[in-house]
Image: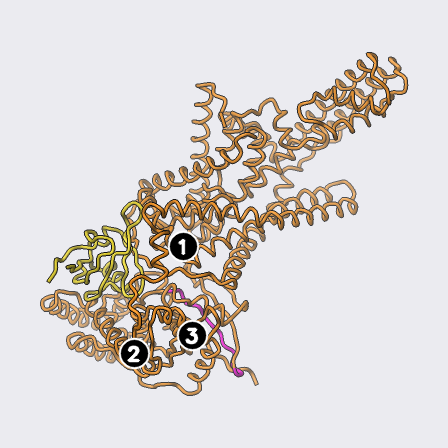
Chain colours: A orange, B yellow
């Protein structure tokens, strides 16, 4: 026999512990998708009890069931259209009054309900005693007291669900009275609805009538299906409005709400007792300090800084492990494949490309963990509260801060989840602007780029420059937001009516699920495409190859150089010093290379060691000649690399772009690197590495040293590059996220907008440096 | 009978009873669904660093609203 199935929907206020209960019920057996047509997350999970297979659907957290917000519409149409067997209303026991407001509305909807009376521990701590049996009797539903955080009562809830299916608690729904005027108007409309043929029968007539009187836009549309009915109902509503405004000075909508609260209030008086009348609970006392007008911002900076510090500290080891793993793979393939296209594809394309991104997973995981701590503890809402006034000045909303922080507001985030985090914003324009400016923040991908340029040119002021860049990215993002809100995305500001949930210690399970969910989403979003992008990138830098003839020409030039030096060595004929010996000595010298010691001295020392005697003037001359040869060879190699790189697709694009980026002082190599940064920012470093390496022109040097050796680079250009990288094109995963959350039109806008801002700012900086011929102090 | 003033003019830690919500439409509904209804006692918990938004205690939770939104809520204070 097939297991019997039950579909359960979880409804409840935000912060009622609905997600915690969902996780406790379904564990890891859950999957996330969007509700059709809207960007509201739909979580579905499974569990079983007493031979029943129970499907649990986590509805969006709402305070009400009106037609004003997407979440509320989604929640109520799910209940109305999908008709789950049971709706479990998760009610915060420590805040019954407001939580029951949603319950009353669920009951109006006419669905079969169970109350999960959550956070009993908190209610107890606040001295609230609830008579659950009496509550159950008055509301006509099963009430299951529980503390989902500790798992207490979760079994009981499952039991109650099965019980409810087998023996329904009550067959006739109880009703709240909204006062004689409204009750009469409702009854009149109900009669009209009963007579109408064109109104879908799926909806409870009483509920339709009530919502119509509340001025619900979605229900008005349904009434429009029957013009005759609509006309009569509208007249009833008009008369009612006039009457209530005359007698009570309020619209029917307000009076209906008052009656709901009135009902709840009398219910609570009867069913609960308060032992302690403490004015300030623990959470309020913490807030006295953490949101204090003077201390609050100080603590905020401190907390964010500590988190930043912690993330980098804790993720450095796992990142090393991953690097070692990829190195290992690289060595294995090195031995396995012969040199050629395939090997290059696997090593440079697949392993380096995918490995480069996967290497950041630990960082991203811990960053999400930290953000989950901030959110689950309730602190994030305080950050939004403290920052709202500032954000509003820039045309954003307090909650935009969360997105910006996720995207790299404390350095090392990621704009992809940042774009997704904008879902908490209700106003579509504020949401879009927030998403559009997230790529300006210092994401984890930009950090390696900064790191290498900073340590090459500004080794003294590392921390300082990193900090300045963080502030800079905030400034750019905020002013860009203000610009967008003042021009293309003008619109009214949405209200800041929010709840500051009480501080709670996050649970490990919750943290794990939150951070893993988001990391997995990142891996899926970026990961599925990253292989394809890595291969495109590799091919762009590999094909077309230089033809055999040109390659042979460079090789013969190198051969000639070699012949020249060999003949010199033979001519001078210093005892015991052959070309091979010099080569070996050179190799030793480069390995031992001490910073700031001329190569000549290093080589002399090395030769001295090899010959085991003092170096005479003849030998000296040979060493100089050898170094000249080395330099000439390197120049040829450099030329060869340059020609080969310029010959590839990306190389050609890079050369073409010089006409524009020339204004910023960028050459084709940098252009190629920046171009690959569009795939993922950290690729700027590896591509720059490729452009500056390719065989032995800079043998044994790190990219940092190579950049320093390039005469075109200097602190001035370095600063311009840093600024450009901070602002320019969002990476492709971010662009895709913007596209899927909004539309691809905005992806396009984002590319053009960011590139223009980057170009203008970088140009101004370069111009400024040039005019005053300043070498940047850092 | 005390004075009736909007939340904006309340002091931190002052308590009062909501007497009237002057907002219509969505704003009015949102205030109500968060528990700000006539007859309910509210206490100003604090103000953000730039004096705006304001945090108030309603029923058993803390809500935040901007000063211009708080102007819709008229409160009777002693």
In the image, A282 versus A272, the foreground residue is A282
In three-dimensional space, the C-alpha distance between marks 3 and 1, rounded to whole angstroms, equals: 25 Å
Residue annotated with mark 3: A146
Give the image location of residue A247, x and y in percent: 10, 69
Q: Secondary structure at mark 2?
A: helix
Q: Residue furthest bottom?
A: A167
Residue A370 lies in the magenta-colored region: no
Mark 2 Cα-neighbour bin, 10 Å: few <14, some 14–19, many ≥20: some
Q: Residue furthest right?
A: A575
Q: Is residue A399 visible?
A: no
Horizontal side, residue A199 vs residue A701: left or right: left
Residue A340 in view in this figure: yes
Range of residues picked out in magenta: A50-61
- Compared with A147, A593 (above or below) is above
Say which residue appears at 28% left-offset and 82% top-offset: A174
- Tell me what residue is drawn at x 78 percent, y 16 percent: A625
Residue A252 at what x, y percent from top left? 18, 68
Secondary structure of residue under mark 3: loop
In the image, residue A648 sits, relative to residue A416, either above or below, namely: above
Pointer 2 or 1: first along the chain: 2
Helix, strand or loop for disc 1? helix
The numbered mark, 2 or 3, whose residue comes first in the sequence reads 3
Q: Which of the 4 image quarters holds residue A77?
A: bottom left
Percent coordinates x, y for residue A242 in the rendering: 11, 67
Residue that label 1 marks: A379
Q: Which chain hosts label 3?
A: A
Numbered circle sitting on residue A271:
2
Label 2 – label 3 distance at C-alpha: 17 Å
Q: Are marks 3 and 1 on the same chain?
A: yes
The quadrant where residue A163 appears: bottom left
């Amino acid at each position: 026999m097939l297991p019997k199935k039950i579909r359960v929907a979880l409804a409840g206020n935000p912060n009622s512990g609905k997600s915690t209960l969902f996780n406790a019920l379904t564990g890891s057996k859950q999957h996330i998708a969007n509700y059709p047509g809207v960007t509201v997350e739909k979580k579905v999970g499974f569990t079983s009890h007493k031979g029943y297979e129970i499907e649990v659907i986590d509805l969006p957290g709402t305070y009400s069931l009106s037609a004003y917000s997407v979440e509320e519409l989604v929640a109520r149409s799910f209940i109305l259209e999908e008709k789950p067997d049971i709706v479990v209303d998760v009610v915060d026991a420590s805040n019954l009054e407001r939580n029951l407001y949603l319950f009353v509305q669920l009951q109006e909807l006419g669905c079969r309900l169970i109350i999960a009376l959550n956070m009993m521990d908190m209610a107890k701590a606040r001295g609230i005693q609830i008579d659950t049996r009496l509550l159950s009797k008055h509301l006509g539903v099963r009430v299951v007291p529980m503390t989902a955080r500790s798992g207490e009562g979760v079994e009981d809830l499952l039991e109650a669900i099965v019980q409810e299916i087998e023996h329904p608690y009550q067959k006739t729904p109880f009703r709240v009275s909204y006062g004689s005027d409204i009750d009469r108007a409702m009854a009149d409309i109900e009669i009209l609805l009963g007579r109408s043929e064109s109104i879908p029968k799926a909806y409870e007539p009483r509920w339709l009538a009530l919502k119509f009187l509340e001025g619900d836009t979605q229900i008005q549309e349904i009434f429009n299906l029957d013009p005759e009915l609509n006309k009569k109902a509208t007249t009833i509503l008009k008369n009612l409005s006039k009457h209530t405004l005359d007698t009570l000075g309020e619209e029917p909508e307000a009076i209906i709400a008052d009656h709901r609260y009135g009902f709840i209030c009398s219910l609570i008086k009867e069913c609960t007792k308060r032992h302690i009348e403490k004015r300030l609970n623990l959470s309020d006392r913490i807030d006295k300090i953490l949101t204090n007008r003077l201390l609050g911002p100080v603590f905020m900076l401190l907390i964010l800084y500590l988190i930043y510090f912690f993330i980098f500290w804790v993720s450095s080891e796992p990142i090393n492990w991953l690097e070692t793993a990829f190195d290992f793979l690289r060595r294995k393939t090195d031995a396995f494949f012969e040199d050629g296209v395939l090997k290059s594809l696997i090593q440079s394309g697949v392993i380096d490309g995918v490995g480069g991104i996967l290497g950041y997973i630990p960082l991203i995981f811990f960053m999400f963990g930290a953000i989950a701590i901030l959110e689950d503890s309730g602190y994030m809402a305080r950050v939004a509260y403290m920052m709202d006034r500032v954000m509003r000045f820039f045309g954003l909303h307090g909650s935009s801060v969360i997105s910006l922080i996720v995207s790299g507001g404390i350095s090392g985030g990621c704009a992809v989840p940042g774009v997704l985090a904008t879902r908490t914003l209700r106003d579509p324009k504020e949401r879009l602007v927030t998403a559009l400016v997230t790529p300006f923040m210092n994401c984890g991908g930009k950090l390696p780029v900064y790191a290498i340029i900073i340590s090459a040119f500004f080794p003294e002021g590392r921390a300082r420059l990193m900090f300045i860049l963080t502030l800079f990215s905030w400034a750019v993002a905020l002013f860009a937001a203000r610009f967008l809100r003042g021009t293309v995305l003008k619109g009214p500001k949405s209200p800041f009516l929010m709840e500051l949930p009480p501080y709670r210690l996050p649970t490990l399970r919750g943290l794990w699920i939150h951070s893993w969910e988001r990391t997995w989403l990142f891996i899926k979003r970026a990961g599925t495409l990253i292989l394809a992008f890595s291969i495109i990138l590799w091919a762009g830098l590999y094909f077309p190859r230089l033809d055999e003839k040109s390659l042979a020409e460079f090789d013969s030039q190198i051969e000639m150089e070699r012949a020249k030096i060999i003949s010199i060595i033979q001519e001078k004929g210093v005892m015991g010093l052959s070309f091979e010996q010099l080569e070996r000595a050179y190799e030793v010298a480069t390995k031992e290379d001490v910073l700031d010691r001329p190569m000549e001295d290093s080589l002399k020392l090395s030769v001295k060691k090899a010959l085991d005697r003092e170096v005479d003037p003849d030998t000296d001359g040979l060493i100089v000649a050898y170094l000249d040869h080395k330099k000439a060879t390197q120049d040829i190699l450099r030329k060869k690399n340059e020609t080969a790189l310029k010959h590839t697709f990306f190389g050609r694009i890079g050369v073409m772009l010089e006409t524009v980026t020339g204004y910023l002082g960028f050459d084709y190599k940098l252009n190629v690197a920046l171009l690959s940064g569009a795939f993922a920012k950290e690729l700027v470093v590896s591509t720059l590495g490729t452009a500056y390496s390719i065989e032995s022109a800079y043998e044994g040097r790190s990219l940092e040293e190579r950049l320093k050796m390039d005469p075109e680079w200097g602190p001035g250009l370095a600063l311009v590059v840093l600024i450009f990288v901070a602002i320019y094109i969002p990476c492709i995963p971010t662009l895709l996220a913007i596209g899927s959350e909004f539309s691809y039109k905005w992806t396009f806008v984002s590319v053009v907008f960011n590139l223009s801002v980057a170009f203008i700012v970088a140009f101004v900086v370069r111009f400024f440096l040039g005019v005053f011929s300043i070498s940047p102090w850092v | 009978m005390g004075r009736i003033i909007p939340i904006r003019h309340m002091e931190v830690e002052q308590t009062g009873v909501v007497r009237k919500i002057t907002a219509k439409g969505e704003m009015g509904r949102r205030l109500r669904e968060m528990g700000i209804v006539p007859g309910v006692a509210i206490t100003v918990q604090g103000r953000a660093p730039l004096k705006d938004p304001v945090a108030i205690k309603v029923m058993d939770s803390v809500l935040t609203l901007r000063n211009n939104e708080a102007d819709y809520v008229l409160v009777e204070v002693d």
